[in-house]
Amino acid sequence: MNKNCAVILGGYVNGYSIIQELHEQGVEHIALLHYGNQVASYSKKLTLILKISKKKEDLLLNLKKINEKFEKLVIFPTDDHQLEQLHELHDQLQSFCFLPFNKTNLNAALDKFVQYEFCEQLGVPYPKTISINTQSDASQLDRLPFPILIKPNKREDLNSNVFRSLLVHSDSELDKAKMKLKKYMEQGFTFLASECIPGHTNGTIYAYTAYRSPNSKKIENEWVGRKLTQYPSDYGVFSSASNEAPAIIMEQGRKLVKGMDLYGICEPEFKWDPRDGKYKLMEINLRSMMWHRTGNLAGVYLQYTQWCDAIKIPINKQAQQKIMVKFSYLKHEMINLLVRKRYYKYFKGNLRGATLALWDRKDPLPFVIDQFYTIIEFVKVFIKKIIRR
């Protein structure tokens, strides 16, 4: 039986970037559990590829299958649903898996309202916020100025039909939003409503990303960066990013990671507020995000840091390079160019000198497959745009 294996959960951009990093750092055995037709499953860097459903029973079954070949599995989740499943399965997995989270507080730490409560305690700026758990709570929305940003307390859109975020601009939109909230609260969802920090998000969202060890209780490595643009709108996901950020981002990020007693890979995101010049917490992610390869390009290897910590080999301290690097997801950039007005200047600036997500000349198939998916998505969006006209 082989000794150690890295297991990546999910084969999207963040999953493939983890595979790239670990392979580059010499990790011999890497397994992927994916959900079907995900681009990372086409990589030749993998020792084992297993397609699974999103049920926790299937996750447990397949981790046990891998354990038949390897003594210890080092787990790398890529979405919140996986984190919640791993937490539920903790007692059945802990004997043969390294699980990168704090079992005692994971569920609370995933809750955005809890994150904002810690901001209050630790002196980290955050937007004015209301927790919406009942119908009576929804009436408090009238206290917030427009526009109002409403999100589920936890990331739920990957596994249900609930929205990822809802932006409300007027009284009439607020009435419709309250009806939506009522329907979802009857299904057990809870929400967070915040004042919307003014200004577009292009270049105003920053992140601190760190690995804090459950063994040493220390932050072992860290880096900071900036989202240059998002997809498909200002309130979407990463499109392009760089390794630039003011020093306050690292200071506030460290406060939260230590103050909340978080373990594993943690990523507090902040948005600059032009009204008071403060960088306010948007959310904390407790897993590898889509743009984490930006850190690799800047000389910091958090996923490999986790691997070293898990198998108890020395961790090298890494300093983030000051030379600017950019990381772009071509699929998102192409569709942004099609649907977002006056986007060409961002498109041109983002791609100039950037490293492209999924690209690896020694392992080209994931990138090639993704371009095929890009063409399909581009055509769908183009047809919708023509129909609307």
Image: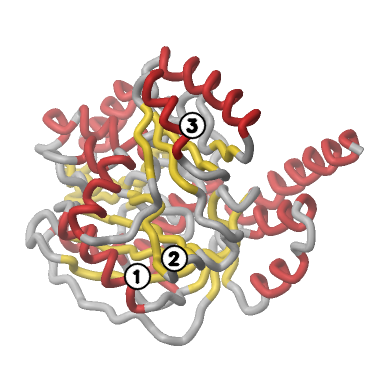
Instruction: Please state which of residues 243 and 197 is positioned toward the viewer in this rendering.
Output: 197
Rendered location of residue 382, percent (x, y)? 83, 43
| Residue 172 located left or right of residue 306 | right
Q: Which residue is mark 3?
A: 157
Neighbour tally class for label 3: few under 14, some 14-19, many 20 plus, Cα within 10 Å: few
SS for callout 3: loop
Density class for disc 2 (Cα within 10 Å; few <14, some 14-19, many ≥20) is many
Tell me which label, 3 or 2, sits earlier in the chain.
3
Identify the residue position indicated by label 1 in the image: 249
The foreground one among 387 and 214 is: 387
Whether residues under marks 2 and 1 lie with C-beta atoms below 8 angstroms apart, the answer is yes
Q: Which residue corresponds to the image point at 67% horizontal and 54% vertical from the top-left?
A: 331
Sequence-first tag of 2 and 1:
2
**Circle 1 residues within 10 Å: few <14, some 14–19, many ≥20:** many
Is residue 328 in view?
no
Label 2: which secondary element: strand
Quickly name the residue at label 2.
206
